Image (spheres, grey):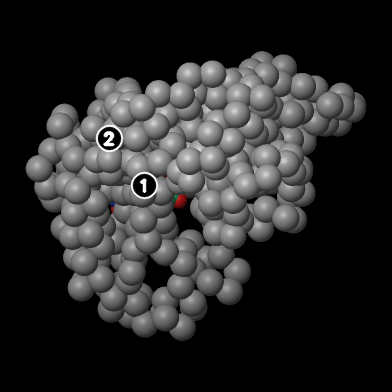
Amino acid sequence: MRIEADVPLAHCNTLRLPARAEWCATVASGDELREALDFARTRRLALCVLGGGSNVVLRERIGGCVLRMQLTGEELLEEAPGHVRVRVAAGVQWHGFVLACHRRGWHGLENLALIPGTVGAAPIQNIGAYGVEVQEFVEAVGAVDRASGEALRLTHADCRFAYRHSIFKSELAERIVITDLTLRLPRARGPRSDYPALRAALGAVADPSPADVLEAVMRIRRERLPDPAVLPNVGSFFKNPVIGRARFERLRAEHPGVVHWAAGDVVKLAAAWLVEQAGGKGMRQGAARVHERQALVLVNEGGATAAQVLGLASRIATAVRERFGIDLEIEPAVY
Ligand code: EPU
């Protein structure tokens, strides 16, 4: 296994921030993972786990040891007439896995196509798009305890999934490293196509197949979201705020156009709308700016620093608070 000192990370994060790691270990097997954990433990180094680096803001210097997770491989655990159960390693690229499942007739993940990053990152923020969240398919998450090196298996209930949230962002954030995901995928499934933007993209297709949904999701994402390989970004920079009904009614009385979705007793607000209405679309700081087609996405035009990106995010949050009295919460992890 390679463990190197003072490693540049600009090519390991999709915002292309010019960070450097004090130490960096590239981990491609369970043994290498245990070796890297031992290395960090004996030197009392903090750990920072990087998958695709597509949901992180890296500051200039990352003290401690960065683990670059490159565990790959897949195991078919069960093939039943109605579903399959598949275990897939944390370092596999998410989108490639989605396409491979679709081709084999394992459905459900089509709505989550083209999300950057790795399989191991998917349960952490419970990735979601176009009406589907990954948690619907997660049966278990495999992990290793950072302190003891012991292998753990968390059930769906253990993961405490919520909107863009899970136990991996709270209690277990510093305690484990995710090694694999066990998913249960239906083999025949009417795809989910009721999300407004997806419905509109499907146009006249009345009874869309999984292939229709896959194609439509990929088309919308390519039209609306900048490709991180071309214009560095980490997708949505803020979560959509969730507020109570009474508070929502007061907000709506003042701002009748507020874009929202009812979610049971609570209401989810479109953060992109709040940001745009608060004047966010013209905002920039150094080489960091708000994307012109999706106000939730901050892009690096070339040469941006973490301080510029975070400074811009904080000015956007202030503008939204002053205009609407709503607090925005940052979505990516900041290291
Ligand atoms: N809107 C604006 N201005 C904009 C963009 C959107 O006013 O610049 C309004 C539109 O009215 C639109 C509404 O906001 O109807 C919602 O926009 P969109 O459908 O693009 O979805 P979103 O809520 O902004 C969420 C996820 C995305 C995911 C899309 C599609 C979060 C934080 N973001 O965005 O996830 O792709 O839905 O399902 O939940 C990500 O997490 O990185 C990400 C890209």
Circle 2 residue:
19
Q: Secondary structure at mark 2?
A: loop
Front position in the image: 302 or 254: 302
Disc 1 from disc 2: Cα separation: 10 Å
User: Looking at the image, do the residues carrying marks 1 and 2 touch, with CB atoms under 8 Å apart?
Assistant: yes
Please identify the quadrant where the N terminus is shown.
top right
Amino acid type at image mark 2: Ala
Question: Which numbered dot is residue 335?
Answer: 1
Front position in the image: 245 or 208: 245
Q: Secondary structure at mark 1?
A: loop
Quick one: which residue is furthest to the left in this view?
Answer: 286
Residue 5 pos. (x, y %): 36, 27
Amino acid type at image mark 1: Tyr
Q: Tell me which residue sits at (32%, 71%) in the image.
A: 326
Q: Is residue 212 visible?
A: no
Q: Tell me which residue sits at (18%, 54%) in the image.
A: 311
Quick one: which residue is furthest to the right in this view?
Answer: 81
Residue 205 pos. (x, y %): 56, 30
